[in-house]
Image: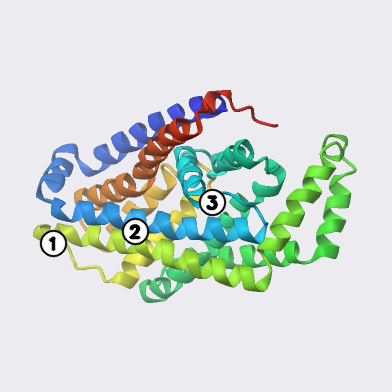
Amino acid sequence: MYQKYKKKIIFSVVLGAVVFLGLSIYANFEELMEAFALYNWIMFPVILILSLCNYCFRFLRWEYYTKVLDIKIDRKMSFVIFLSSFIMSVTPGKIGEVFKSYLLKEQNGTPVSKSAPIVFAERITDFLSLVLLSLTGALMFGYGTNLIIGFGLLFVLTVFVISNKKLSYAIIGLLEKISFISRKSHKIHTAYDSIYQMVKFKELIITIILSIFAWSFECLSFYLVINGFSVFGAPHIDIFIATFVYGFATIAGAATMLPGGLGATDASITGLLVLLAIPKSVSVAATLIIRAATLWFAVIVGIAAVMIYQKISHKNINEIVLES
């Protein structure tokens, strides 16, 4: 299974290097290195801990979804499987995180079509929570408010369509007229039944609250990152503005469907910081630090989790066969 995504992960690493090179040229490499040298690196372990807190709350959400779908699995193994999917964080739209559905199938036979919709539900609650977190800062910043509200309405509409069985079945019925899709109709219905259970009012509220807590930790991380450059005389950024910048950039990056939002998220963070009169070298340095502590740290955690999974399950992920 892993072999299918190996080229995409390598491509993402190369793309990440290209982004680093481009930002370095934009900021002037020497000034960028000076910014890194003067950064308060004592805060970096704290930032990584906050990223781990993000993962823990997202795991609680994953656990809640598995209970909603009546998927039974040992909590320790569930945690390892959840973290293993982070190795796919740099796939387009994080769709590679469906990897955890294949590991789940290996452990207890849960059909992929039943558990894979969890990834879709996670993306919905991620977006909605980031919209809510970003909105206050957007109103204070006076930028991007309409775009953020637009994204929010789009996902509210998506939830409305999914939660309306009559409308959803009508859409599925139209899709089933396509021969390729009709052959997968039973899996489509299984997937829809799963996602329907996860977007009911109670389930949606609980998972959005968990998502808000999860992403608040990463927004706080960014706040600590950008204000760690005070030695440069950069203006202090309050927590609401920092939350908007990070939330808006994350939404923008995800909307492009680029692997890990590479390029789009990085450019958005840097551009917004420059608009706040923060020097280019500091803006780029802050961008690279927060991306290292979130996106690339997640990939490292995923690699470690995959190694642990293989050790305790005595299975090689390369031998796990993917369905189309």
Quadrant for the N terminus, please. Answer: top right
Q: Is residue 259 visible?
A: no
| Side (left or right) of 151 relative to 39 | right
Task: List x then y, in percent, for residue 144.
Answer: 46, 66
Q: Where 120 sits versus 15, above or below?
A: below
Query: Nearer the N terminus, badge 1 or badge 3?
Result: 1
Residue drawn 46% across and 44% down? 80
Helix, strand or loop at label 3? It is helix
Q: Which mark is residue 179?
A: none
Q: Which mark is residue 230?
A: 1
Q: Which residue is mark 2?
A: 272
The residue under label 1 is which amino acid type?
Ser
Cα distance in 3D space between marks 1 and 3: 32 Å
| Side (left or right) of 6 relative to 26 | right
Q: Which residue is mark 3?
A: 255
Helix, strand or loop at label 2? It is helix
Query: Nearer the N terminus, badge 1 or badge 2?
Result: 1
The residue under label 3 is which amino acid type?
Ala
Q: Nearer the viewer, residue 318 or 247?
A: 318
Task: List x then y, in percent, for residue 257.
Answer: 54, 44
Task: List x then y, in percent, for residue 148.
Answer: 51, 66
Cα distance in 3D space between marks 1 and 2: 18 Å
Cα distance in 3D space between marks 3 and 2: 17 Å
